[in-house]
Amino acid sequence: MGVQQRYFQVFADDGDVEAATALGAEGENIACAPATSLRVREQMLGTAGGYANFFTLFCDLNGGTAQQVTTTSSIVKLVTGTPTDDATTAQLLTGAEAFVAGRYDEDGTMTAITIAENEITECEWCVQIVSGDVSAGDVVKFYVRDNAGASFTNSDPPEVTVSAISFDITSDKVGMVALCMDTEMSLTLDPRYRYKIVHTGVDANGNGDTESQLSAWLSTLSGTITADGSVEDEKYELLTSTNETFGPGISALYAVSTAAAADAVLRVVRIGTPTQSY
């Protein structure tokens, strides 16, 4: 058995196989926010002995132990994408060798592929980085392995750097923002308006205590703010209750949520008419 993991490219999940938008050039590592569907395409070259079976996708976090990517795995998981699962792939990446049709995978199973020495194939996996398992700045690296998880030679494994989640609600009266555990988030706001921000998380005991509050720091570009926006550059834990009002004069908010805020949703409501910006 002989395979070399050779070339790669990362795509958005916005089209069929060979029709999705490239997020970088061939061989280019990218940055991406968690919970965003990506399609990781890998090219494999048959070496001495070739290969006849299906391929599996593995990943590691910050150079740690590699683990298989499945529909329920931590760090990265397989997700349902736009193409039909197990669809055949055509060649997209560099390679003059004879090409054998590969497979697109979103559930951890694919039809077996047979490549002889000096033949190539390309497989594509639809994945999401799991928000609760990473932080902004973490690096996830991907590897192709055989059906039993044995390693191949890797010439250049793709890397995805975890980026902050960003929302622009300057043109909207109401924005719904999903927060992810231990992941940086930013909101772009119109500084002419006041806003009300409401944490819609569930109060498990129905008593209005901190279970229904958001443990997160929010700040402006120039510093943190008070709940009513009257004092800029003063440290303040904005969401000490389930809703607060702030602004005008705030153009951006940042938050890093904790375990208590996992999967919480913020409802950001623009209030009244525009005022002059600070």
Image (tube, grey):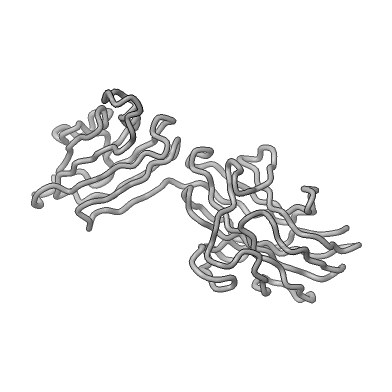
Toward the viewer: 206 or 136? 206
Q: Residue at x 73, y 61 (%)?
A: 6
How far across and down, in percent of the image, does residue 108 sit?
67, 54
Q: Quadrant of the N terminus?
A: bottom right
Q: Residue at x 20, y 31 (%)?
A: 226
Quarter-wise, where is residue 126 in the image? bottom right
How far across and down, in percent of the image, does residue 233 sit?
23, 33
Q: Is residue 5 above or below residue 20?
A: above
In the visual, does 197 lie left or right of 182? left
Toward the viewer: 252 or 267? 267
How far across and down, in percent of the image, does residue 178 sit?
37, 45
Toward the viewer: 21 or 35? 35
Q: Which residue is drawn at 73% across and 72% down?
A: 101
In the visual, does 197 lie left or right of 118? left
In the visual, does 214 lie left or right of 11? left
How far across and down, in percent of the image, does residue 174 sit?
22, 51
Toward the viewer: 47 or 128? 128
Q: In this view, does 246 lie above or below 155?
A: above
Quarter-wise, where is residue 264 in the image? top left
Q: Residue at x 27, y 50 (%)?
A: 175
Q: Residue furthest right?
A: 49
Q: Quadrant of the C terminus?
A: top left
